[in-house]
Amino acid sequence: MITVFLGYQLSFFLRGFTVSGVSKNTVGIENFRGYFRLRLPASVAKGTSRYFSTGLSSTEENKKKAQILAWTIEEDISKDAFDWTLTKYKPQSAISIQAQEWVWNLEKLWEKYSDFMRSQLAATTYEKDYKRKLKNHIKEFPTKDARKAIQIRDWLLANLSLESAKRILRYMSACCHWAVRSKLLPVNPFDGLAADIRAIRGKATTIDPFSIQERDAIIGAFEAHKLHKYYVPFVKFLFYTGARPGEVIALQWKHINTDCTEILFAESYNANLKIRKTTKTGKSRRFPCNARLRQLLLEIKPDDVNPTAVVFPAPRGGFIYMNRFTNQVWRGYKSGKKTYKGIVTQLLETGKVSRYRPPYNCRHTFITEMLQRNVPVQQVAQWCGNSAPIIFKHYAGIVGNAEVPEF
């Protein structure tokens, strides 16, 4: 027994130290509340996840056992055979629910994490991102075992863009971090994986406004269309206010003062999810109407206006479904062998619009035009429900003179 123990000590000395000092894979031993616990190296765990209770009371005899256990873990780390469940390193009597296979199932973990986050998220974010998009991504993973985080990372990088892969890894790490804090998992296998993915430099900005000529061409095309001319006020309002589509869809006549000189943006609506909520920032804002916008509102305002009626209803009443508007009216769609071209797609073919952009870019068009007209950034941010730093960050380099000035 002494020979074996001395052998472990020699092994520890050779493995635990390098020329520059202590190895990065060294497992520490601590006396915590009368029991020995191990401190795992940062290479496999971080934060509170680094501490692993051995279940051994603080005696000299148990200290030897704890040391041998620490060396065993170091050996496994060096051979890339570390047991993420920690089951291998626990006495059989100490194996708890954490050692059961189901707790590593990402689908089940994500379901529990989503339930935990629900009260902290906007209703649309919860339904669209947590219950749909990310849940569907997890279903497509090559494995649902969180311990195989590296395999999942490599699959994401091979099948999705860098930005999407990085974003999903962040969500998986947040989920497993919560699971560790909730005593469901011993460690977070996704910790740090997203940070290893570098963003692409020089990526083209998503801020792509229409030119004023393109804006007017779009409005003119709607006005000339026999069927889609119904949407002219809606499209003009998007261009004239820079409001988010969900805010425009939610707008009721009670949000506009009697003489149509001021608008209160206080809510947003997602017709697909049938959810009315606050604005994206959670704050209401007032928007002053210029003569052009005021005239538009006065023309469509009913004589016997109902304060709770929506300002821009769908053709058959109720709320406008933005996805349907985009697919069937703005862009166009295919049905069987037939292709129905939308307003903007037709303008693209005739050269009146240089490239396709979705309705949301009406907002970018308004913001860009205001900045080009030298409206202070702080004022534009207040009108549009953004912060001045966000305006600077996303629109710097887009707004400017089309030609180099003479000097």
Image: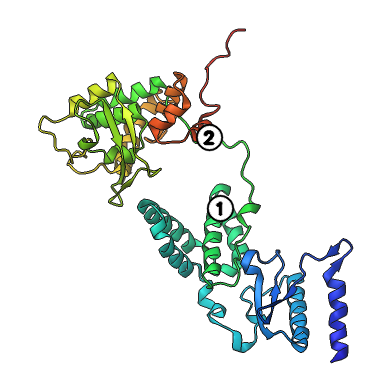
Disc sitting over residue 222 in the figure = none
**Callout 2 touching callout 1 (CB < 8 Å):** no
Q: Which mark is residue 165?
A: 1
Q: Residue at x 48, y 62 (%)?
A: 138
Query: Relative to residue 245, is residue 195 depicted above or below?
Result: below
Question: In percent of the image, x 87 and y 61: which residue is there?
Answer: 20
Is residue 228 among the parts visible in the rendering? Answer: yes
Q: Secondary structure at mark 2?
A: loop
| Direction from residue 37 to residue 321 in the image, left or right | left
Image coordinates of residue 270 in percent, x first then y, are 31, 47
Depth check, front residue: 330 or 128: 128
Towards the viewer: 301 or 336: 301
Quadrant in the picture for the N terminus: bottom right
Q: Residue at x 69, y 86 (%)?
A: 57
Using the image as rendered, state which of residue 286 and residue 331 is in the foreground. 286
Q: Quadrant of residue 364?
A: top left
Q: Is 141 rendered above or below residue 237?
A: below
Q: Which residue is mark 2?
A: 205
Picture colour scheme: rainbow
Disc 1 crowd rating (10 Å Cα; few below 14, some 14-19, many 20+) is many
Disc 1 on helix, strand or loop?
A: helix
> The disc labelled 1 sits on which kind of residue?
Ala
* Residue placed furthest toward the left: 304
